[in-house]
């Protein structure tokens, strides 16, 4: 049974790795940024009760599941970008998608840190505000 489970996990990991274009530095960076963002979001809600996503600022399982669903869709977009690279025989579409999502995750991490009361350098705060304003101008509700 142990060998069967190990084989299934190995095959699943291999297929997922192929789908995202390999488990290289960009994908590793995205996975780490996604994990840090999720954990900092949990800390903001669970410890500081300062989440803007819930009425009381505390933990809400539906909000958590929505966050995980968004991260899953992010990975699916990376899969599609990798398939576009393969189809067009180029090597930049996936990396561009991963870089954009990494930047988005980093902004969210900074936002979470700010909600915890961590002082963010002015240059980062102004960049975050400009990106937020740009997103609102473009019709986006979140960064």
Image (spheres, rainbow, N blue to C red):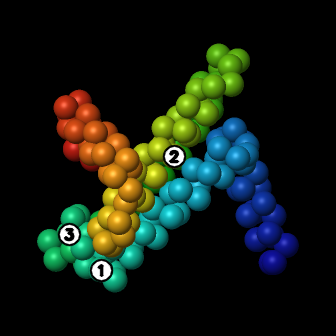
Residue 139, above or below 23: above
Residue projecting furthest to the front: 122
Residue 131 is left or right of residue 72, and the answer is left
Res. 48 image quadrant: bottom left
Q: Position of residue 3 (x, y in %)?
A: 85, 73
Is 122 placed above or below 35 here? above
Looking at the rendering, which quadrant does residue 2 occupy?
bottom right
Question: Which disc, if any, is residue 102?
Answer: 2
18 left or right, relative to 27: right
Q: Which residue is mark 1?
A: 48
Give the residue furthest to the left: 55
Q: Nearer the viewer, residue 18 or 44?
A: 44
Earlier in the chain: of badge 3 and badge 1, it is 1
Residue occupying image coordinates x 22% and y 44%? 141
CA neighbours of label 1 inside 10 A, class few (<14), some (14 to 19), many (20+): some
Q: Is residue 15 above or below residue 49?
A: above
Going 73% across and 46% down the picture, which residue do you hit? 24
Q: Disc 3 and disc 2: Cα gap in Å? A: 25 Å
Cα distance in 3D space between marks 3 and 1: 13 Å
Query: Please, which residue is most extreme toward the right here?
Result: 3
Q: Is residue 120 visible?
A: yes
Q: Give the distance between the C-alpha atoms of the residues marked 2 and 1, in whole angstroms.
A: 25 Å
Q: Where is residue 87? Give x, y as percent.
A: 65, 20
Discs 3/2, front = 2
Q: Which residue is mark 3?
A: 54
- SS assignment at label 2: helix
Q: Earlier in the sequence, mark 3 or mark 2?
A: 3
In front of the other: 124 or 18: 124
Picture residue at 36% right of the left edge, 70% below the top: 118
Secondary structure of residue under mark 1: loop
Query: Residue 133 shows which numbered tag?
Result: none
């Amino acid at each position: 049974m142990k060998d069967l489970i190990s084989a299934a996990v190995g095959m699943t990991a291999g297929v997922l790795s192929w789908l995202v274009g390999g488990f290289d530095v960009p994908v590793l960076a995205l996975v780490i940024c996604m994990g840090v963002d999720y954990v900092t979001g949990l800390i903001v809600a669970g410890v500081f009760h300062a989440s803007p996503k819930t009425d009381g600022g505390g933990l809400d399982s539906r909000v958590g599941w929505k966050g995980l669903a968004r991260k899953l869709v992010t990975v699916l977009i990376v899969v599609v970008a990798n398939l576009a690279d393969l189809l067009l025989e180029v090597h930049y579409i996936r990396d561009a998608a991963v870089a954009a999502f990494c930047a988005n995750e980093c902004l969210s991490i900074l936002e979470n840190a700010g909600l915890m009361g961590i002082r963010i350098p002015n240059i980062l705060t102004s960049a975050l505000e400009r990106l937020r304003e740009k997103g609102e101008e473009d019709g986006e509700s979140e960064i």
